[in-house]
Image: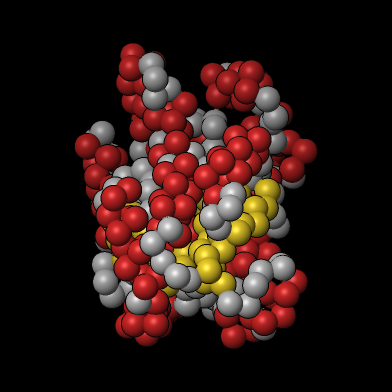
Amino acid sequence: MRVLYVSGALYSGNGSIVHAQEFLSALSSFPDENVEVDILPENLFIDGKFKKLLSFLIPSLSVLSKTMDKMIDKNNYDLVIIRNFYDISLPRRVKKKNKNSLVFVEFNDLICDRSFMNFASLNRYFVAKEIDCISCADMIFPVSSQLEKRLRGLGVDSGKVTVNHNGVSVEKFDNRIYNKSLLLKEYKIPNDSLVLCYTGSITKAKKLDLVIESIRRVSEKVDNKLFFILATDGKAGDEIDMILKAKLKSYVGYNRYFWLPHDDIPKLLAISNIGLFPFTSPYMSPLKLFEYLAMGVLTIGPRTPAVEEVFDDGNHLILVDDQPEFEDMLLEMIKNYDRFYESIASRGAKHVRENYTWKKNVERVLGKYFELVALRGN
């Protein structure tokens, strides 16, 4: 079985790189089928907003598109998987180039929604164009039911759409392989600290300033010695440092890490008592929640449709609506940590490790491939 995996996220500097790389790894090593996977080389992917816009508007000018066309001509792929790519015409062009290849599209959001969210007329025009191209795919895999509803509302054939939630590498995110005492020493965190952790990229919807403000206020109401770990990208590094210094100095010890390799994240979670990810956009299925839970970390997450369809509040983790509820729950969790940990953390870990691995994510995609192949045979 020959597969072409097309995703600029493989070489990105944001959180989407984790999904792309872990999916590719699971696909390439899939045990039950002889799967040979090709990818496009990194040097073909475009840097710079102007060049991306030009490629978006006039795909025929893109060196990457021309290279992909040649690869498809040469290799006659059984399956082409396209993930969140700025050239929205790709599904249509691949189907036109090789009618025998099945084309699958994966995405976290509509590219044109993200790119033209502040321009209503442009948004409507380009979203309609993107939907027209996506609809040429044989299968479409949004990351949440929220996105599935959006697609159906825009006229996409529901028979082509299958929700495929995020996953986690259970080999990497396994707290049994880490020595917490040694890691606390390595990261210079006092042994008697109760460690709070936030990992992931920072956007306006994630309200990091409110998270930090709540940590400070809660610290004034508990006897526990709190320590905060923040691992994120450095795009707003100076602003983040100012917030940490202004709101936590003299109250809570903290370590902050910018652009930390993803392979180091499990080490931080291995020394964390409570994982924090209380706010996000309604459509998002935060990858970090899967990682927190796989490591057995007691977790506070956002009460959004995309999260609630995967996790049970009070059973796998604790969900909150807003800052006051987050603050109250964090305070309660710190005061009664042992009770919360014993009643929730292990169930959350079991749920993720049994149901939401990258291997299972790939199984769902390949399962649809073999279904469609069988239908073609009939």
Q: Residue furthest left?
A: 153
Q: Position of residue 156 (x, y in %)?
A: 28, 39
Give the image location of residue 52, x and y in percent.
62, 25
The residue under the point 33% across, 14% down is: 121
In this view, which residue lies farthest toward the right? 43
Residue displayed at 65% across by 72% down = 190
- The foreground one among 77 and 52 is 52
Q: Residue at x 32, y 21 (%)?
A: 124
The location of residue 291, given as percent across then percent down, is 51, 66
> Which quadrant would residue 268 be assigned to in this image?
bottom right
Q: Position of residue 233 (x, y in %)?
A: 63, 45
Say if residue 273 shows up in the picture. Answer: yes
Is residue 357 something that shows in the picture? no
Is the C terminus in the top left, top right, bottom left or bottom right quadrant?
bottom left
Count all numbered tags in the image, as a single digit.
0
Q: Is residue 196 left or right of residue 280?
A: right
- Tell whether 334 sits left or right of 35: left
Position of residue 367 relative to residue 49, above or below, is below
Residue at 58% over, 53% down:
250
Task: Specify the quadrant that holds the N terminus.
Answer: bottom right
Describe residue 164's horizontal placement relative to residue 243 as left or right. Answer: left
Q: Residue furthest top?
A: 121
